[in-house]
Image (spheres, helix red, strand yellow):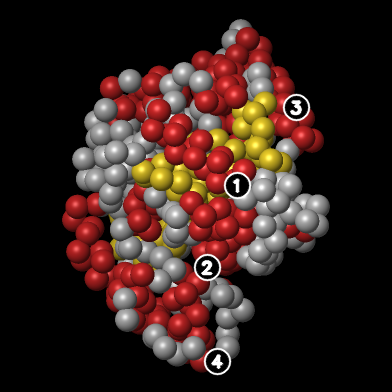
Amino acid sequence: MDLQALTALELADKIKKRQVSVLDGVKSVFEQIEKKESRVHAYLDIYKKEAYTRAKEVEKGIADDLYNSPLAGVPIAVKDNICVKAHPTTCASKILGDFIPPYNADVIDRLERAGMIIIGKTNMDEFAMGSTTETSAYGVTRNPHNPEHVPGGSSGGSCAAVAAGEAYLALGSDTGGSIRQPSAFCGVTGLKPTYGTVSRRGLIAYASSLDQIGPIGKNTADCAALLEVIAGHDPLDSTSLKRDDIQFSRENDRGIVGMKFGVPKEYLSEGLNPQTKAAFMEALKVLTGMGAIVEFFSMKTTEYMIPAYYIIASAEASSNLERFDGVKYGYRAAEYEDLHDMYRRTRTEGFGTEVKRRILLGSFVLSSGYYDAYYLKALKTKNLIKQEFDKAFADYDVLLSPTAPDTAPRLGESLKDPMAMYLGDIYTVAVNLCGLPAISVPCGKDDKGLPIGLQMIGDCFMENLSRQPAELPDFPALSAYLLRRLGGD
Ligand code: GLN
């Protein structure tokens, strides 16, 4: 049996029916790692021995009916900014090169309780700052569709691992698009949940008001099942929500007749690659053909989304990253004169260029004299953006856009021009500013064979049917349906 062809849910089902062993699933992943990892470099750390031991344990657990989860026995990769007890968690930064957390992130405990098997930690942009996985201190990850191109970022390792069959599922984190954009570039599916749905405890913070962990998989059904495993209230995360509507994988095939989709006109203007636009327009045609109503509308705050995001994200990052000072944990400069010199040298040597740029920008916009002009203004702008989304959701059930204006750039291209790289986040950042859920599903390829993603944005809590009008399909099922229609599954 070709286990590689199976989705995570199919693998789990075969395991449950004893047609495949847990060990078989784990072996198929390691065979793929053996074949592809030297080229792709999706992982920073691989737990080979532990995964085999755990496979036996889970096999027994399944026989004893220990796990109440449809994903028991499935191998999963975890982004390296999520703490796994007693294993290095580096955030792809030199400054955390030897950091070994003494505790698990909440999501890791949940994966374990669900009988899932962690294969290792995946590469990422340093502290999740970037869009290409090239700012990692531990080498670049390559796009499995074409090794000359980046996998996107910052969860590039997680998306590349799923695309290369080096994991059935992966966890990523999304602060401004870091799950959705690399999912689009790698031709997989990735979902950023409503803020507060998944606990951030044990996720090393980039911008706390925007960060959210989410699932990456081969299709939407797998993502929905994984989100169901990781979602839930955590009393130790003060931003964690008590939601009673987290049955994301409930099937629904009621179709989308009469459903209203809105497309922000401004998203389709300058900077959009014509091939990406063509694939997107084709997707709109498919939707209309299925009986949905697709309309264009104006989103006037579009031009303020990138500036507001980069000011708020950098401000929060500069504050969050203050703790890396060489005192309690992580890297410390070998030589220094006094305490302040130790701080300076540790941070100078420990952080990469992109992280330093954000710390400088963030400290600047928070400094007295500039706070009102930049940070406060960005917060006010965020409110205006949120108001426009609220208005849009009064008219439309779901908003649609390409996930990114272009397909994956060639390695080395983006770092030359950080501003251009920031502009590539245009369709994803507002979702985080407003706490909304959004998913990227594959919707075609360009003439170089590089995948294109379609982004669907829902109103808060709309991952699930229970808060939608009864005649509408739920969010993941809708995308699964679309995915089948678009031939990307
Ligand atoms: N590319 C964006 C940034 O660099 C988003 C990153 C993310 O979502 N972690 O900030």
- The label on residue 387 is 3
Q: Are marks 4 and 2 in contact (CB under 8 Å)?
A: no
Nearer to me, 20 or 2? 2
The residue tagged 2 is 111
For the residues labelled 2 and 1, the Cα–Cα distance comes to 39 Å
- Which of the labelled discs sits on residue 289, or is there none? 1
Q: What separation in Å lies between label 4 and label 2 (alpha carbons)?
A: 18 Å
Q: Earlier in the sequence, mark 4 or mark 2?
A: 4
Task: Tell me the quarter of the picture where residue 233 sits.
Answer: bottom right
Residue type at mark 4 is Asp
Mark 4: give few (<14), some (14-19) or many (20+) Cα within 10 Å. few
Horizontally, is 124 left or right of 208 in the view?
left
Q: Earlier in the sequence, mark 1 or mark 4?
A: 4
Q: CA distance from mark 3 to mark 2?
A: 36 Å
In percent of width and height, residue 88 lies at: 36, 56
State the residue position of label 4: 64
**Amino acid at pointer 1:** Gly
Mark 2 element type? helix
- Asked which quadrant contains residue 416, the reply is top left
Tag nearer the camera, 2 or 1: 1
Give the quadrant of residue 162.
Answer: bottom left
Q: Nearer the viewer, mark 4 or mark 3?
A: 3
Foreground tag (3 vs 1): 1
